[in-house]
């Protein structure tokens, strides 16, 4: 576990070195040495204790690799990470269902600019159609 990964996971989980020490049983001084880069390659047993305390498995820890501690808040909140983890545990049917729900919600919230523009054009077209009808039609 590199110091960057530990900092990222702690930031995402909203966990301080004190809290992580309490949960993991790893001394705070060891955690600080990892964070500061003094111990860049901690023992497997230490990593395992930290990962367990953060409610992660090794695979989930690897998922944090492409993120940097500086921009993590811009990418995902803790709640968003929880949703992502739940999504990853779904089977294909569940993932399709989530995708369908998201599409409906995007449309409802007008998040999708293309859908918003299409809706406006549709309303404009309907209005033009109503204005060009022959009298008595």
Image (spheres, rainbow, N blue to C red):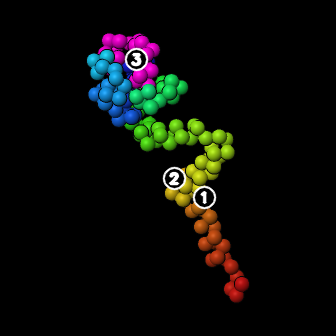
Identify the residue under disc 2: 111
Q: How many marks?
A: 3
- Name the spot of residue 59 as percent of width and height, x first: 53, 26
Identify the residue under disc 1: 118
Q: Could you say which is closer to the camera, residue 38 or residue 113?
A: 38
Q: Could you say which is closer to the camera, residue 108 or residue 90?
A: 90
- Name the spot of residue 87 as percent of width and height, x first: 56, 41
| Residue for point 57% across, 37% down | 88
**Secondary structure type for disc 3:** helix
User: On the rendered structure, is 100 left or right of 78?
Assistant: right
Choose the circle earlier in sequence order: 1 or 2: 2
**Secondary structure type for disc 2:** loop
**Secondary structure type for disc 1:** helix
| Residue for point 61% across, 41% down | 90
User: On the rendered structure, is 39 left or right of 84?
Assistant: left
Of all residues, the one furthest to the front in this rendering is 25
Residue 112 appearing in the image:
yes
Where is 64 relative to 131, above or below?
above
For the N terminus, the image quarter is top left
User: On the rendered structure, is 33 left or right of 127?
Assistant: left
- Marks 2 and 3 sit apart, C-alpha to C-alpha, by 44 Å
Where is 117 relative to 17, above or below?
below
Query: Which segment is the magenta one?
Result: 31-51
Numbered circle sitting on residue 46: 3
Q: Could you say which is closer to the camera, residue 8 or residue 70?
A: 8
């Amino acid at each position: 576990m590199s110091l960057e990964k530990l900092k990222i996971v702690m930031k995402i989980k909203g966990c301080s070195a004190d809290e992580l020490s309490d949960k993991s049983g790893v001394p705070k001084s060891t955690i600080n040495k990892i964070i500061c880069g003094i111990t860049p390659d901690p023992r497997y047993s230490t990593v395992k204790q930290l990962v367990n305390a953060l409610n992660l498995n090794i695979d989930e820890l690897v998922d944090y690799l492409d993120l940097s501690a500086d921009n993590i808040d811009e990418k995902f909140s803790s709640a968003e990470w929880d949703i992502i983890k739940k999504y990853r545990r779904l089977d294909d049917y569940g993932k399709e269902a989530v995708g369908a729900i998201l599409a409906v919600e995007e449309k409802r919230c007008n998040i999708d600019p293309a859908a918003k523009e299409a809706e406006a054009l549709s309303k404009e077209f309907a209005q033009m159609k109503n204005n060009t009808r022959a009298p008595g039609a």
